[in-house]
Every structure is written in C-alpha cells, then in structure tokens.
Image: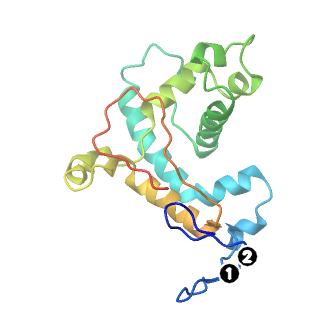
Amino acid sequence: MMAKDGDVWHNNPNHSLPGMKRTKRIEPGGPMSIANGAKTPVEVFQLFFSDIVLVTICAHTNMKIGVLQRAFRNQEHNTTTDLGIMELKALLGILIMAGFKDNHMTMAKIWSHFHGWPLYHSTMTECRFVFLMRAIRFDDSASRVERLKNDRFAPIRMIWEAIVTGCRNNYTPGPHLTIHEQLLAFRGNCPFCMYSHS
C-alpha cells in the first residue's frame, strides 16, 4: 500500500524491501549476573548501594555532624550523634518510602501519629531526620572547591558513578524500555543543564 506521502506499507510484517539488511536478534533485557539471585528488596538495594558507598557517606556525614554539633548544643544528645550504617539504611528507606507513598504530605503530617505511617516515627524522630538531612554529605568538603573547578557534579560524583556502575553490572535494558523526561518540583539552582534522551 502506498501512503499519500509516498511511504510504502506492507501487509506482511516480515516483508523486507530490496537492499534492507535483516536486523540482529534483539536480546530481552532484565537482571543479570548476581542480580538474578536477589530475592528481597534489601538484597536488590545492596546491589546499587554497596557497603563501601554507605561507609563513605557515613564518614563524610559524620564530619559535617562534628561541625553542626556545636550549633545544636541545646538539642537532645540522640539528635546530634554520629551516623552509623544501619541508621543510614533506615534514613534512605524513609526517603524511598516517602517518595513512593507520601510525597504529597508535609513533614509534620508524615511524622504525625494520626496522619503518618507508623514506619516513620518508629524508625527515628522528626528532629533526628531533619538533622540528618541537614548533615548528610557525599564527598570530602575539604577538597570539593578544587574538584568543582573541573567538575560541577563533584559533590555527588563518587556516589553517582557507583550507582551507575551498579546499574550497568546488574541490569540490561530491553527493547521495550523508554527513557523520557520527567519534571520534578525543585526549589534551588542547578549549575548545569540536564537533558533526557528518548
């Protein structure tokens, strides 16, 4: 069949025009290597956030906590203590869960015993969560200024590369995967342009 614009359409989907090469067989995507053995959400999480990444985040965050402790002398001791790996996992779990379930709620409602989900206030107090969100760091702030001269992504470069490596090592994109733009609410300045590819 001939379209008005001159394109030729065929009834047989396997019909190939003269000179066209048969495309290679497209392999299905999905988990690969060790990811095939991951059965629980925690095991999947650890494929992308290794203990090395978590220890690095804890170390840099605790450096910032040391600075902030002087300004939070009046807070309860539990609010300003150093961050451990287990508590970091709990913090990331709260952020992931809130992003999926309660991203429309204010922090006061999330930690409310009436409106909020018990998971949040049974994991940590609202004061502790706010303090950790203020303190969390992903790189060495002492060398950041020098690294920012050549890399605007410097504050999260190491963590970003580790997660990207985890994605490449554990998942193969399939033929039916589409990456498109997504608009997210953001109240800040981003020093670089971000593009999406479809």
Residue 70: image quadrant is: top left
Percent x, y of residue 103: 61, 26
Q: Are marks 1 and 2 in contact (CB under 8 Å)?
A: yes
Question: Which residue corresponds to mark 1?
Answer: 15
Residue at the spot 41% in from the left edge and 56% down from the top edge? 158
Q: Nearer the viewer, residue 30 or 130?
A: 30
Q: Label 1's element?
A: loop
Residue type indicated by callout 2: Asn
Q: Label 2's element?
A: loop
Q: Nearer the viewer, residue 173 or 87?
A: 173
Q: Nearer the viewer, residue 102 or 156?
A: 102
Percent x, y of residue 90: 65, 38
Residue at the spot 51% in from the left edge and 36% down from the top edge? 82
Question: Crowding at label 1, few (<14), some or many (≥20) Cα neighbours within 10 Å?
Answer: few
Residue 50 seen from this side: no
Q: Nearer the viewer, residue 135 or 176?
A: 176
Give left or right: position of 36 versus 18. Answer: right
Percent x, y of residue 47: 64, 60
Res 62 label: none
Using the image, determine if residue 191 lies above or below residue 128.
Answer: below
Residue at the spot 65% in from the left edge and 26% down from the top edge? 124
Q: Quadrant of the N terminus?
A: bottom right
Question: Which residue corresponds to mark 2?
Answer: 12
Question: Crowding at label 2, few (<14), some or many (≥20) Cα neighbours within 10 Å?
Answer: few
Residue at the spot 67% in from the left edge and 73% down from the top edge? 10
